[in-house]
Every structure is written in structure tokens, then in C-alpha cells.
Amino acid sequence: MNKKTTGLVAGAAGAALLMGGATFALWNDSAWVDGGAITAGNLDVSAGAVSWKDVSEDRTQGNHSINLDTFRIVPGDTIQGTLPLKAALQGDNLVAELSLDKLGVTGNEQLLAELAEHATYEVRLDGTTIVDATPLAEAEALRFASADNSQNVAPLPTLPAALTATPNLEVVLTVTFDEDVAGRDLTRAKATLKDFDVALTQVRDAGVDGGF
């Protein structure tokens, strides 16, 4: 091979090496992007024990605690049970309904009808009444939004992100035994409040108050 041919071969090999990228590269750069944690919200409820009082208007001693198992109600009496609750919601789109599931009373049907006719309930949130005295027969689930709900335009009452140290909700049941009974009607009749569940249930329906 002559010198000219040898030079051409060497030159072609060098060009191929350069074009192959072994000795140079097109510009490039990179930047670090932080990731992010996806964190679930919260829905929580706990119930304390129901406390009962005799709140009859004609009692000179004023309201006083009673034991529902031993108290004997008579015509004209009004008793009141308070259920303390702790409830929490957290989530930008979180709305939930609070209800007393399986709430009911068993016993003498006439007494049940008499008491139910004069039974009301109310709901307090952080000491403020949000449901005024309402006939128990008209009780409905109560809707709340999380405090961080950005679509709470109704607005719905809000609950904190975590359970508080003390109850933030109270459900108050008031029952009156009407004075308008004849003779010895309903003496020693018995009605028993059954065990029941307190349910806090997420709802997500387009168009409802609170955005979902």
C-alpha cells in the first residue's frame, strides 16, 4: 500500500472515530426534581357514655343527674340524655354524615308512643347549637365538612383534622312524659333505649353541599 493510500485510510478511520462520539458529545444537562408524599386524610369518631338528667321545670333543686335504670318517670317529667362525641375529618374534598344507627326503643307500645310524641333532639358543636330542638321522628343524618375542605361553599359545619382532647360534639335527647294521662294508665310500663351505633360516613355525591 502506497503512502497516499495509507494516509486516506488513516484519515477515514479518524473521522469515523470522531463521528462515533467517543471523543465528543452534543451538549446536555439535567436538573433534580423533588418527589412528593401522597398522604391520606382522616375520618374518626368516638362516643362517650350517655348522661341523663331530670330537667322537669317544677323541680326546685334544678337539673340533677339520674340513673336511667332506677329512675321512675311520672306524668309531667322531662328527662334529658346527653351523648358526648369526638369527631374528626381531614381531606381537601372530605364531607361526611353523622348518624345514630340502630337508634330505637323497645317496650310497652303505648308508653313508647306517648314518649315518642314528645321526644326531641338537638346537636351542639363546640358548645354552639347547630340543630335546634327537633322532633326525634324527623331526625336526619347531619353533614359536616373537613376544616381543610376547599369547596365548602354552603358552608357546612366543620370538624378538626384529629380527635380533640375533649368532646367537640353533643347530641341531646329530651323526652317528656305528658301530663295528659287518665287514671293509672301506663303505671309500671317500661321502655328501654337499645344499644346503638354512632356512624360517621363519607359522602361523595356531585352537587351536594360542600362540593361533594
Image (cartoon, rainbow, N blue to C red):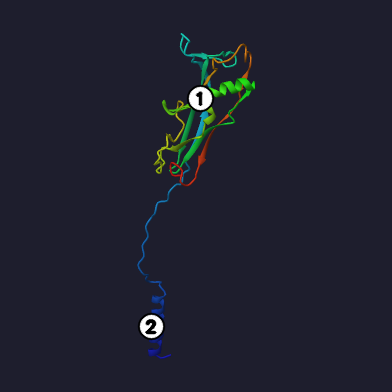
Q: Is residue 36 visible?
A: yes
> Residue 4 sits in which quadrant?
bottom left
What amino acid is at disc 1? Thr
Q: Residues within 10 Å of mark 1 (few under 14, many from 20)?
A: many
Query: Which residue does the numbered mark 1 point to in the structure image?
Result: 120
Query: Which residue does the numbered mark 2 point to in the structure image?
Result: 11
Estimate the x, y position of residue 41 in percent, counting from the top left. Answer: 47, 41
Estimate the x, y position of residue 128 in percent, counting from the top left. Answer: 41, 27
Estimate the x, y position of residue 168 in percent, counting from the top left. Answer: 45, 28
29 lies above or below 156: below
The dot on residue 142 is: none
Q: Residues within 10 Å of mark 2 (few under 14, many from 20)?
A: few
> Residue 71 sits in which quadrant?
top right
123 lies above or below 23: above
Direction from residue 32 to residue 138 in the image, left or right:
right
Taking the spot 64% from the left edge, 20% from the top edge, the residue there is 108
Which residue is at the front of the view, 78 or 179?
179
Q: Residue furthest bottom?
A: 2
Count of numbered marks: 2
What amino acid is at disc 2? Gly
Direction from residue 200 to residue 126 in the image, left or right:
left
Estimate the x, y position of residue 19 in percent, counting from the top left. Answer: 39, 76
> Residue 179 sits in which quadrant?
top right
What is the secondary structure assignment of the residue under circle 2?
A: helix
145 lies above or below 136: below
Q: Which corner quadrant holds the N terminus?
A: bottom left
Which residue is at the front of the view, 166 or 21?
166
Which residue is at the front of the view, 49 or 14?
49
Q: Is residue 170 visible?
A: no
